[in-house]
Image (tube, grey):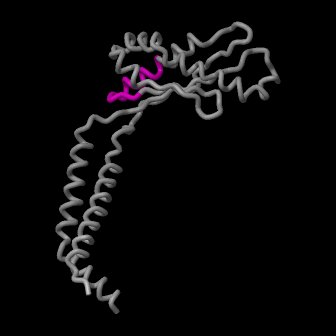
Amino acid sequence: MADAFDLADFLRHLTRRWLVVAVAVGTAACGVAGWAWTTPPRYVASARILIHPPAGEGSQWPAAMSGTYMESLKTFELLATGDGLLRAAAEATGLPFGVVRSNVRASLAGNTRILEISAELTDPAKALELARWVAQRTITLGSSDAPGRETLELVDAGALPESPSWPNRPAAVAGAMLTALVASLAFVSLEFAVKTPRP
């Protein structure tokens, strides 16, 4: 009975203090919503390149698709994000070099020969233009018809991003509301524990 009485007493206390919870949740939601809707959204555009093994190697390549060979493909990541290439990209797209350098990424997709070039900017069209330009220049610089060299092929030129990658406005508001709810309930619970007389 003591447990039931304590729970009922707490619920009455919570009912009396509902405004604390409501104000905390409402303030958090409004604050984060204001931040999320005034922060310029950022968009990610990507282009994908397929790295073809050297011509004429034939059946040797299935066994060579791991270990040292796959590790060697990471040199194409360095090629795509090298200062020389990115300076040329900045001149071609009219963007500052610092912006290009800090917002272009190149990475192999898992244990595959797919090299993904991505660009993140506040202008989705400019992000796509930059990703495509870097991908095309990487193909130009990285491909070779010489024996024992890989060739590169653009297999996905990307598409204009429709949704921002950051900030995720609904998730940000929901997360703020949940955090405020938990914190305000914890405060009310602590307040109840302090005010409740002990036998």
Q: Which quadrant: the N terminus?
A: bottom left
When asked about the image quadrant of residue 108, the answer is top right
- In the image, what residue occupies the spot 23% across and 54% down? 28
Residue at 33% x, 54% y: name it.
175
Q: Main secondary structure of the magenta part?
A: helix
> Measured from the top left, where is residue 49 in percent x and y?
58, 23
Q: Is residue 92 found left or right of 190 in the rendered image?
A: right
Q: Quadrant of residue 160?
A: top left
Count the numbered circles shown: 0
> In the orientation shown, which residue stands out farthest toward the right?
59
Q: Image quadrant for the C terminus?
A: bottom left
Q: Is residue 40 left or right of residue 107?
A: left
> In the image as oriented, which residue stretches furthest toward the front?
199
Q: Position of residue 110 (x, y in %)?
A: 61, 34
Over which residues does the magenta segment extend? 120-133
* Residue 47 location (% of width, % of height): 51, 26
- In the rendered image, residue 130 lying in the magenta stretch gets the answer yes
Residue under the point 45% across and 13% down = 83
Q: Is residue 76 above or below residue 29?
A: above
Q: Position of residue 70 (x, y in %)?
A: 67, 26
